[in-house]
Image (cartoon, coloured by chain):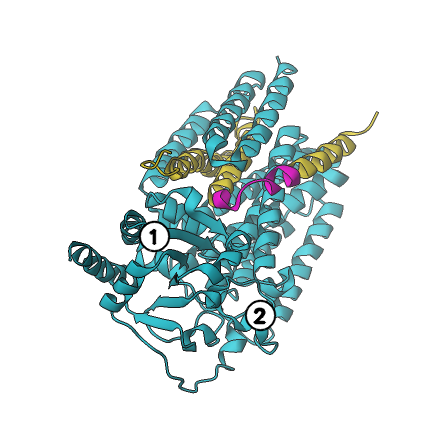
Amino acid sequence: MPSNLELGLYVFMLATFVGLEVIRKVSPLLHTPLMSLTNAISAISVVGAILITGAAGATTLSKVLGFIAITSAVTNIVSGFLITDRMLKMFKRRPEEKK
Amino acid sequence: MAQFVHYVYILSAALFILSLRWMNHPATARRGVFAGEFGMILAISGTFMAFDVHNWTWILSAFLIGTAAGIPIAYIMPMTAVPQRTAMSHACGALAAALVGTAEFYQRQPHASTELTGFVMVALIVETLLGFLTFTGSLMAMGKLQEVLPQRPITYPKQNVVNLVLFVVALGLGIRLMLVPTDTYLFPIFAGIALLFGVLLIIPIGGADMPTVIALLNSYAGLSACAMGFALDNKLLIIAGALDGSSGLILSIIMCKAMNRSFTNVLFGAFGQIQASAVKTEKRPVRSASPEEAASILESAGKVIIVPGYGLAVAQAQHKIRELFDNLTRRGVDVKFAIHPVAGRMPGHMNVLLAEADIPYDRLYEMDDINGEFPQCDVALVIGANDVTNPAARTDKSSPIYGMPILDVDKAHTVMVIKRSMSPGFAGIDNDLYYMDKTLMLFGDAKAFVSEILKELPAKAAA
């Protein structure tokens, strides 16, 4: 059986290739919303922050650091998704001329 | 129940990939955002249910504060400030990763011999190193974009040597910590050097290089989240981090190509500073024109291409330009926008600004798609762009921007440039475009000048 490290590296390798292929197809028109969206997605690190803050034997240091980490990650999640949507709503085709 | 969460994570990961997949077209992009939100909610609630989570007061208050901070940021932030917000969110994301790594390091100390072994320690060091340096680096980028810090590169002698030494020291301490994780006194020094390195890495980089730097910091922030996934053995974190990392990487490669420069050159070149001394200050004659003249030229044109740049964002001229666009379109003029990949301060910056002003996105063209159209275009109107239109990039081998792909504005029948003064652009080089016989310089603030042109246009229509 492969170890956790090896499995992790497989996942990393495959996810990187998927990422490169998918992102390459994104139109330059949307590069700014793309960046705010990936930013929100990578704030999934909030999971790690929850686990360290919520551990049964968490020390005060862990709780304080975890608290700050959750706050910043949640800020990113909330503002990232909302501002991406706000930007995307602005991209419109021509409204008046419908041939 | 604890097993169940892994299936939830797999679903979330699939949703994240779909989310980015749907970003490839404006028509499906909003669906992408919903997929991302759904994936995030699944992952967070799955985590709450599957694990034995304590300290709810801490966690819930952090969620409340984060939400309370996030909503106003998303809705109040003007679109011209989007680069700053992006830099700030890189800083937040990187900080979260760095702090979780730090907390893990101390939390696991009592069981160092079993839990801080080999590769977990490597992952923690990578996570904290990237996290801390991206945190301060992004704050510096944000300061420059907000113009709290000078946009010009800040340089001093032996800068690259100092940076290199610091980086080697940080790396050395990191390796030492990997080998002897119980040397806790080294960790604050390590973190401090990483923080300092982030500052020093970004201060020598000039404002116009920000698109590349922001993309690169995006990549680092993603990779530190990815390293956290390795440290916690959480595949979802690895996937999301790798997606963010590869996205940042692709964007920075696109930005570098669009400036014909390499990563090393952007990071260590302190562009703009060195060339500034080489500016030729000889006076050459230019032709300038009034708003009335500009209006009558635009009115008689059949095809106009507008070339926006960072100056447009500074002047907040996007809404006035929309009025100009509407006015000319109503007169039957074919108006298009030519967007250079590095126009503005982050990838795609101009597109968002023009979209905000309700300019339809099918009028925005990428460099390669529109360059062939300049020879048939009656008027090229350059607003707040400079180096990306400089024909020297094609012809003058001695020019610092030689080889950079540019918009072929000089091939249009008439060129009009709205500019505040003749001062050179960020690269500190003269733009030959301004001295051509077919070029008219329109001196003034972009927003004010376009308003003046607009005042002339309806009057002429009535006559």
For disc 2, the marked residue is B394
**Pointer 2 with pointer 1, Cβ within 8 A:** no
Point out the image quarter for the C terminus of chain A.
top left
Task: Please state the horizontal and vertical placement of residue B67, each as a whole percent of the image.
Answer: 39, 32
Indicate the secondary structure of the residue bearing disc 1.
loop
- In this rendering, the label closer to the viewer, 2 or 1: 1
Q: Residue at x 56, y 34 (%)?
A: B20
User: Callout 2: 10 Å neighbours few (<14), some, many (20+)?
Assistant: some
Task: Please state the horizontal and vertical placement of residue B61, each as a whole percent of the image.
Answer: 40, 29
In magenta, the rendered stretch is: A19-31
User: Which one is in front, B385 or B3?
Assistant: B385
Query: Is disc 1 on the same chain as disc 2?
Result: yes
Question: Which chain is represented by yellow in the image?
Answer: A
Is B308 contained in the magenta span?
no
The answer for which chain carries disc 1 is B
User: Which one is in front, B41 or B338?
Assistant: B338
Q: Is residue A60 above or below residue B207?
A: above
Residue B403 lies left or right of residue B365; in this view the side is: right
